[in-house]
Amino acid sequence: MATEELKLANQLCFPLYAASRLITRSYQSYLNEMGITYPQYLVLLVLWEHDGLTVNEISNKLILNTNTTTPLLKRLEVLGIITRRRSADDERKVLITLTVKGRSMEQVAAGIPLKLGAALLPEGMNETDITDLRERLHTIINYLSDKSE
């Protein structure tokens, strides 16, 4: 018999992992209509908020390595959603900007959070509970990010 510390039900990592996977799956039908994946959607969320970022800036915001972000960006470029170009000031930096197509996708994506909001809200929880959970998760993310630097 496993010790209490090793039981799956007693782990923090598993419910976070499982919830993340299930939430991502809930997004998929909407993202399929847009022709993008969930990681590509995250890149677009960053660019809709701040267009014209470098690969490193996008990677930092998404807490990803650049070798993970670069293939996402290349695929978005092939789809005509972003452009990648070397910075005139520092050619080591690659600037990412939305195309007209990429900017227009924001209108389609704007309805996704509302559509998913009710579907993802378990019985017995309200929007305040979800907001509190999100803030607590951000606290954990910030703490762990600071520790890894």
Image: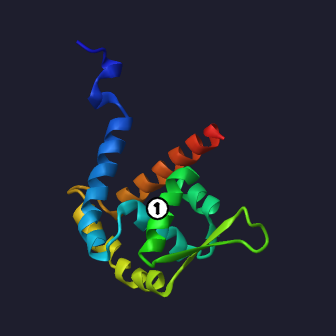
Q: Residue furthest left?
A: 123
Which corner quadrant of the image does residue 76 belong to?
Answer: bottom left
Provide residue 62's location: percent of width, then percent of height: 52, 57
Report the residue that reaches farthest toward the right. Answer: 89
* Res 57 quadrant in image: bottom right
Q: Position of residue 104 (x, y in %)?
A: 43, 86
The residue at 35%/82% (across/down) is: 108
Q: Is any part of residue 64 visible from this angle?
A: no
Residue under numbered circle 1: 72
Q: Amino acid at mark 1?
A: Leu
User: Against 2, is 58 above or below?
Assistant: below
Query: Is 122 drawn above or below residue 9 in the view shown?
Result: below
Seen in the image, is 56 located left or right of residue 68?
A: right
- Left-right relation of 82 to 57: left
Q: Residues within 10 Å of mark 1 (few under 14, many from 20)?
A: some
Relative height, residue 18 to residue 101 (above, below)? above
Viewer-closest of 53 and 111? 53
Q: Residue at x 38, y 79 (%)?
A: 110
Q: Where is residue 101, by image quadrant?
A: bottom left
In the rendered picture of this protein, how many numbered marks are placed on residues?
1
- Between 136 and 145, the residue placed more toward the observer is 145
In the image, 49 versus 89, the foreground residue is: 89
Instruction: Determine whether the residue tagged by mark 1 lies in a helix, strand or loop.
Output: helix
The coloring applied to the image is rainbow
If the image is split into quadrants, where does the C terminus sit?
top right
Residue 34 visible: yes
Q: Residue at x 38, y 36 (%)?
A: 13
Q: Is residue 138 left or right of residue 147?
A: left
The picture places residue 88, in percent across and down from the top left corner, at 76, 74
The residue under the point 25% across, 68% down is 118
Image position, residue 41 (x, y; %): 41, 67
Task: Indicate the quadrant containing the N terminus: top left, top right, bottom left or bottom right.
Answer: top left
